[in-house]
């Protein structure tokens, strides 16, 4: 699985949910914020900045929101992207189970983000945990390259939510 991202969820001392997520090869932590309600981490290639990136992985953890339905949260995020990108193209949401958690995957394409005047391709995965809700987005300013070791579907599928307290969600 690789080393967990610096923002991987850490279980409480008595155990709990853990998001196992590796940092893509050549990426660095560019931004990380946390509050009592949420945690956000942004990863970008090591030679880029938050103002000028070509690829970005954003992980959000919403503490105490395990009851949120993954398809509704993913749709809400897509609506927020659509508000910023009037010509947004949405793929069909795909719902599945991963380690006995409900997940939703969605692809978004913004032909021209008005803020940057650049296209964006967004691959989004929402995971409905028992304790918290998790979103992972891979965003590109150019179409993702085939053959990359961390293609969006491979990378997002490899991220695992587990729970040290539960045999139904093994780590």
Image (spheres, rainbow, N blue to C red):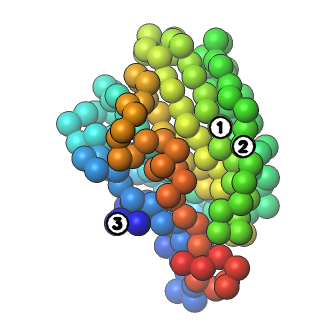
Seen at 72% across and 54% down, the residue is 96
Comes first in the chain, label 3 or label 1: 3
- For the N terminus, the image quarter is bottom left
Percent across and percent down for residue 114 are 51, 11
Total numbered labels placed on residues in the image: 3
Vertical arrangement, residue 56 with respect to residue 7, above or below: above
Q: Is residue 125 left or right of residue 65?
A: left
* Number of the label disc, if any, that sits on residue 165: none
Vertical arrangement, residue 24 with respect to residue 115, above or below: below
The residue identified by callout 2 is: 94
The crowd level at tag 1 (other Cα within 10 Å; few <14, some 14-19, many 20+) is: many
- Which residue in the rendered view is the most extreme toward the bottom? 14
Q: Are marks 3 and 1 in contact (CB under 8 Å)?
A: no
The answer to whether any part of residue 116 appears in the image is yes
Front residue of 120 and 144: 144
The crowd level at tag 3 (other Cα within 10 Å; few <14, some 14-19, many 20+) is: few
The residue identified by callout 3 is: 3
Could you give the CA–CA distance between mark 3 and mark 1, rounded to whole angstroms?
25 Å
Could you give the CA–CA distance between mark 2 and mark 3, rounded to whole angstroms?
27 Å
The crowd level at tag 2 (other Cα within 10 Å; few <14, some 14-19, many 20+) is: few
- For the C terminus, the image quarter is bottom right
Secondary structure under the numbered disc 2 in the rendered image: strand
Front residue of 64 and 47: 47
């Amino acid at each position: 699985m690789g080393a967990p991202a610096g923002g991987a969820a850490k279980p409480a001392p008595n155990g709990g949910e853990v998001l196992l997520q590796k940092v893509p090869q050549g990426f660095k932590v560019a931004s990380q914020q946390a509050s009592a309600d949420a945690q956000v981490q942004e990863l970008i290639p090591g030679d880029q900045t938050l103002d000028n990136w070509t690829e970005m992985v954003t992980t959000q953890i919403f503490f105490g929101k395990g009851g949120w339905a993954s398809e509704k949260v993913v749709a809400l995020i897509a609506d927020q992207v659509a508000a910023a990108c009037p010509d947004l193209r949405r793929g069909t949401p795909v719902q599945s189970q991963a380690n006995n958690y409900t997940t939703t995957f969605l692809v978004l394409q913004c032909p021209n983000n008005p803020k940057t005047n650049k296209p964006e391709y967004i691959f989004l995965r929402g995971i409905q945990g028992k304790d918290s809700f998790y979103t992972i987005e891979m965003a590109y300013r150019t179409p993702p390259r085939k053959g990359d070791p961390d293609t969006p579907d491979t990378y997002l599928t490899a991220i695992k939510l587990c729970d040290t307290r539960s045999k139904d969600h093994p780590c």
